[in-house]
Image (cartoon, grey):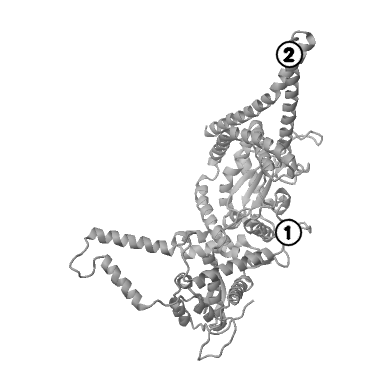
Amino acid sequence: MGVEVGAQNARSRALAVLRIRSRALAVALLPAAVAVVLLVGGSTGHITGGSWPVTRLIVTVLAALVLLAAAGIALVVARARPAVSPTVPIAEASAPDLYRLVRDLADRLDVPPPSAIALTPDCDSWLEDRTHPAHGPPPPEHRDEIAGARGVGGGAGRPRRAPAAPVLVIGSPFLWWMRVGELRAVLAPVVAGTGPSAHPDIAAARRFVRGLDAAVAVTSEPARGPLVRTVLAGVGWVTRLLLRSCRGHAAEMERGVAAAAAERAQAVDYGLRIVAQEQVGLAYAGWDRLLTRVALPAWRMGRWPSRLDAGVVAALTELSRRDRLAEGFASRLGERPACDLLEEPGSVDEAASLLAARLFHGGPAEPGPDWAPVDWQEYPDEVVDRTWRTEAARLHRVLDALGVRHPTDPTQPDQGGPTLARVLDHLTAPATPAADDADLSVDRREAYGERDTGVSLNETEVEVAAEAEAEAEAEEEVGEDGEPVLGSERTAALAAGLSAELAREEAAAPAVASGPTGGAEQPGPDWSFWDDGMLPLFPLQPPRSGRELLADHVTAMVCCAAMDTAGAAPGLDWLDGPALLVDGVRAADLGPRVLTLVEDGDPEPLRDWLRHLGVRPEKPVRLV
């Protein structure tokens, strides 16, 4: 019953969208209809004399202009290419078991199967319509994909009238983290959506809305001349008006489709789907952590991890060891993973990893000398070590540009090389006289009524004074941009210098390749469906502030000194990214000590940490 209610609601909303399309067509034809009446009336002698000839001429010209404008708008809407999600297409020959699973699922749900399967580097799954002519030719008549699995009738000469089923897009992390049964349960409501999508009214309404959306995107692109801009502005105004009129009905139509699909999927693995939804949330958390903490440092160094999906399994397994709430998830690893449904999971993982780097970081479309893949075994040396030494070298270049001298230690000969002591001395804030602190404490005791003067403030006044002082201190510690004020002017100048140096390096970087140059047939992203002029499409993090850059570079310098003078080694933490290993154990509590130095100019916590590990700040370190 719920399926019928949701489907009926979706169809009624689809009809409302189509009625808006019909009304727009009627408005465009109305002047032409009036002109025809006037012309016929004039030719038959019923409408003659007076001002009718002039009216007939004005209406005829107006009708011609309206028809010309309507034809132009219809042409733009018809030829505009709807947006398509960047994905990695999966042919049936490379994943026959996966296609068989989806085909069986469609049979159980009694819905048409998807026309193809594609993977996306995200924790989501959906159906995507790719029937627009700009998205490529129709599927071949020899059914090598799911489209012909149910034996759709029709000869080779029959015109292409029946709409093709949508493409099933699956999040690649699901295939590696979920088991086969869990994946089937998660895909059940998604595949069930092909049933309502096959209805002619819903399909027509979706095509109309997608065409309007694509036309709005076309009119928003920068034009060449003033005439073209004027024409596109008019087209954009009309398409936006139609899109606003359809927005509510289209949203309710999609809700009806989703409700019908969810209701239909209730009969398939309902209990397992509840458990699988927990895995969806866990996979999303692990994927986000892996991208921001592990993959992003590698991308910044011109390396892209080629097994990101396999890294999700390692990250979530590590989470299950640390978090007692996730203890039961590790026991699932003994079951068959969904990635076994692929013939070559390694190649698919590599293609999805390259696409993730393209979308989230804006990297090149294919590997090259400055954009090379890296395995997880090589990550500590190829990424962590190189990142730390590159940032330490950049830090000392900026210090050289600022004219900072090397420290002179009477007990050690002047090495003149890049040392951690040079950084610590430069960031250490000048000491304030103790007398000023004593006078300030006396003034504060007087303000709080703590001085024995015979007159004391009441408790309410003391609390008000304390709150006022706390607010004043907070305002002093936070700058106009919301960032904490750095320890001293020298620290601020160093942070600004790092930001400028990094900006110069990024500006001098070679241009990103716009697409692959060709090669052997192998799984890879379909670059022809989308424009790469706005990469990255989904940036993971905003640009780092000067304070964050300075803290990262100081941390890198500390790690380089620890590796060169205390026998530490670079490592990889699946949840936190680059890590410093001392005797095989991750060194902790470094970040807060570096922030204390950067923000307060106090080096003592960091010096205590260095003495505990046996790090010698006065020794030169090796840089890139």
Q: Relative to residue 42, is residue 481 drawn left or right?
A: left
Identify the amino acid type marked 1: Ala
Q: Tell us which disc is closer to us: 2 or 1.
A: 2
Which percent across, then down, holds residue 17?
61, 31
Among the 4 quarters of the image, the one containing residue 350: bottom right
Q: Residue furthest left?
A: 454
Res 198 visible: no
* Residue hosting label 2: 52
| Disc number for residue 513 | 1
Q: Residue at x 67, y 48 (%)?
A: 117
Q: Residue furthest right?
A: 157
Q: Relative to residue 77, is residue 190 drawn left or right?
A: left
| Front residue (pair 551, 262) | 551
The correct choice, above or below, for 207 with respect to 477 in the image is: above
Query: Of helix, strand and loop, which one carries label 1?
Result: loop
Identify the amino acid type marked 2: Trp
Q: Separation of disc 2 and disc 1 at Cα?
A: 64 Å
| Front residue (pair 254, 565) | 565
Q: Relative to residue 598, is residue 389 drawn left or right?
A: right
| Front residue (pair 319, 393) | 393
Circles 2 and 1 in contact, beta carbons < 8 Å: no
Res 176 visible: yes
Which percent across, then down, holds residue 444?
30, 68
Tell me if mark 2 has few (under 14), some (14-19) or many (20+) residues whose alpha carbon lies within 10 angstroms of its own.
some
